[in-house]
Image: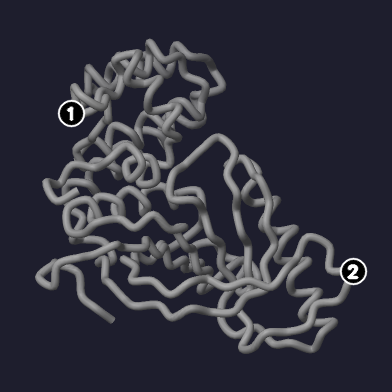
Amino acid sequence: MANGLMSIGTFSRASLLSIKALRAYHAAGILVPAEVDPATGYRAYLATQLADAAVLRRLRALDLPLSDVGEILRARDPDRTRKILTGHGELLQERLARIAQAVDEIHSSIEHPASLTPVYVRDEPAIQIVEYRGQVREADFPSFLDTAYAALYALLGRLGVRPNGPSGALYPPVVDDVEEVVAYVPIAAEAQLPDDRGPMALGEVPAATVAVLTHHGGYDSIADTYQLLGRWVAEHAVSADLQVREAYVISPADHDDPERYRTDICWPLDRWPSTTEGKTR
């Protein structure tokens, strides 16, 4: 949105919270939109609310009751947060320091985004791919991608076709409880697939102008990079209704150390001003 507000769809993708969850958190008074259109009921959020969304998402992943999550967000007090988490059970004790550090890092990254890898804009051409589709829950993303890439690379090996770039995946522009995920490997030219190819097919990733932010490290913290990129899009551009792309520049297939992983998150744009802070590459 031009005014810096984020539609519920854009906020959903940036925060990795489903629209269904955002509506529930609004109803519970935990994450209230900055604006609700009285005529249409459409919700809009401030980019600064991504910090609260990230804290909320992490606490809910620990099965913390909504009432406690709401109290933590309202209090914004580390001591109160520790007291609530301690009371949630001994199981949380081992995670307490990591959670407190994550919350501090989230707020720091939102307040000082320039200290991280900058967002830039680039034009991506259409590419031919061999793809593997599935309806997947977020918790099952790793196992789905492992299965998909094993099958894709095995098929290309049988055909004697070399990949034409790093593997990638496409995710819908709006987060849902179950999403259609497309794992793919680029190829230089269209190939003839055998009849016993299983769920794999030829496809194309369409040309698009994308905002890019590179995530450094393992996938457990990729949500932080999504919120930074989503905030940049909300403040500088207009999001296109296309699948978000992840390109696994350095993946587990390339290195055993997750700290060495590099993932380009590519957010399709409908339009963007020429005077943004990002740099075209």
Q: Looking at the rendering, which quadrant does residue 164 occupy?
A: bottom right
Residue 271 in percent (x, y) is at: 24, 64
Residue 175 in percent (x, y) is at: 47, 42
Mark drawn on residue 35: 1
Is 157 rendered above or below residue 69?
Answer: below
Whether residue 134 appears in this view of the structure is yes
Mark drawn on residue 248: none
Is 278 rendered above or below residue 62?
Answer: below
Q: Which residue is mark 2?
A: 196
Drawn side of residue 118 relative to residue 2, left or right: right
Count of numbered tags: 2
Residue 136 in percent (x, y) is at: 64, 44
For the residue labelled by badge 1, is the local secondary structure a helix, a strand or a loop? strand
Q: CA distance from mark 2 to mark 1?
A: 52 Å
The residue that appears at 23% across and 35% down in the rendered structure is: 45
Drawn side of residue 247 relative to residue 6, left or right: right
The residue that appears at 34% across and 64% down in the rendered structure is: 213
Is 147 rendered above or below residue 214?
Answer: above
Residue lying at the far right of the rendered structure: 196
Drawn side of residue 277 relative to residue 224, left or right: left
